[in-house]
Amino acid sequence: MLVSKLRVADVVPTIGWTAKVSRTVFGQSRRLVVKVGSSSLTHPAGGLDHDKVVAVAECIAAATQTGRQVVLVSSGAIAGALAKLELKARPRDLATQQAAASVGQGALMRIYTEVFESHGLVVGQVLLTAEDVVRRSHYRNAQRTLYRLMELGVVPVVNENDTVATDEIRLGDNDRLAALVAHLVHAEALVLLSDVPGLYDSHPRGSDAALIADVYGADDISDLSLSGSGPLGSGGIKTKVTAAHIAAGAGIPVLLTDAARANQALMGADIGTMFHPTGKRVPTRLLWLAHAADPVGGLHLDSGAVEAIVSRKKSLLPAGISRVSGDFHRGDPVDLLDENGRTVARGLVNFDSSELPDLLGRSTEELARELGSAYRREIVHRDDLVVLLPK
Ligand code: GLU
């Protein structure tokens, strides 16, 4: 996983409260997203494990047949191609990852299609890139497709479009993708299936490690060290916890458990680690902006502007910006930084970076008088801005 992505993942929106929810929500929710990781679908050395894929598919098919709408976010494209391509380990270079995903995605879908078909169900492949979904027009498009598939009774099978995604535009892990998709489709619950029964208070291989059954907010687990990722997928426990915070912060309860317990999870059994909702639903474009957008530049603010943005919920005006970094175009996502270089917010900017130096430090009134009324507009409008605070 890229370091730049970790920076994005390290920030979570302000959390104000926690709603305690019973695990029955995972057994009763009418619409839910289930994410399954590469290690739960492949052999340890790589290559799709047919039986494992079938087991997951059977479980989702059973839930679908009870009238529930399930969106499956499935990894396994890259890891699934290793054996076919005679690769010994998950490739590190982008071109081979893209090629592997191209081979593995089709093989993965073939198994899903067969299993669901044997239950009289149809699957639809939905491949998303972060870029596809960060812009309002694009994620609306993805949302419409997912809704239509569900209306048609089709089970959407989502993955990141790794064949065309480049490091700059990829999310890189399906955990966050699943959290964002859960929000996009207004899911009532998110289940993250991996190869561990849940979140432990120390390394699960340690004999005295204890399962953490409930997480009521990021503070509950801020002391845990969450490093490391598995050999096959790109996410480790850290990306799962980040994804869980994203979903829980937007009002969606999350269950983290292992794929072997998928059936129990979808029946609402008392297993795994549950992340209780810590916030309410937020506008989709702001969630994407906070967690999917890779900022292409920065606006450095004076302390007055930081206060206006963070505490007074104002738009960003040119008077409060002291410096601009990076090359960007109108509509791009940019970071808003305080005087210490900390990211305090992220927003969609209303000007190209080349236009900004002449505007900085000046009032919109003055600019409108001198350059025309188009220059009265905010640099970042409040509606296109999300405040991010360090964990
Ligand atoms: N999209 C990747 C794949 O299908 C997996 C990403 C992840 O491991 O989270 O291979």
Image: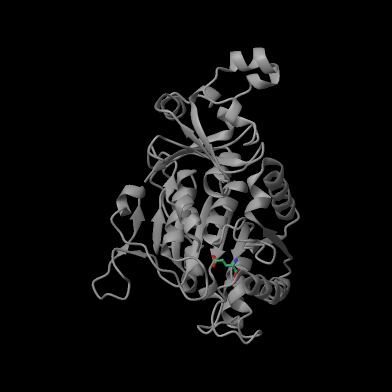
Residue 31 pos. (x, y %)? 59, 52
Q: Is residue 372 placed above or below 280 in the rendered structure?
A: above
Residue 263 pos. (x, y %)? 51, 68
Residue 232 pos. (x, y %)? 52, 75
> How is the model colour-coded?
one colour
Q: Is residue 233 placed above or below 179 in the rendered structure?
A: below
Q: Nearer the viewer, residue 177 or 331?
A: 331
Q: Nearer the viewer, residue 223 or 297?
A: 297
Please say whether residue 317 is visible from this viewpoint. no
Q: Quadrant of ligand 1?
A: bottom right
Please say whether residue 202 is visible from this viewpoint. yes
Which residue is situated farthest in the bottom direction here? 86
User: In terms of image quadrants, where is residue 43?
Assistant: bottom right
Horizontally, is 247 left or right of 54 in the view? Answer: left
* Number of marks: 0
Horizontally, is 375 left or right of 52 in the view? Answer: right
Q: Residue at x 58, y 30 (%)?
A: 357
Q: Nearer the viewer, residue 287 or 257?
A: 287
User: In terms of image quadrants, where is residue 237?
Assistant: bottom left
Residue 265 pos. (x, y %)? 47, 64
Which residue is situated farthest in the front direction here? 358
Horizontally, is 217 left or right of 32 in the view? Answer: left
Q: Residue at x 41, y 43 (%)?
A: 278
Q: Residue at x 56, y 46 (%)?
A: 295
Q: Nearer the viewer, residue 355 or 213?
A: 355
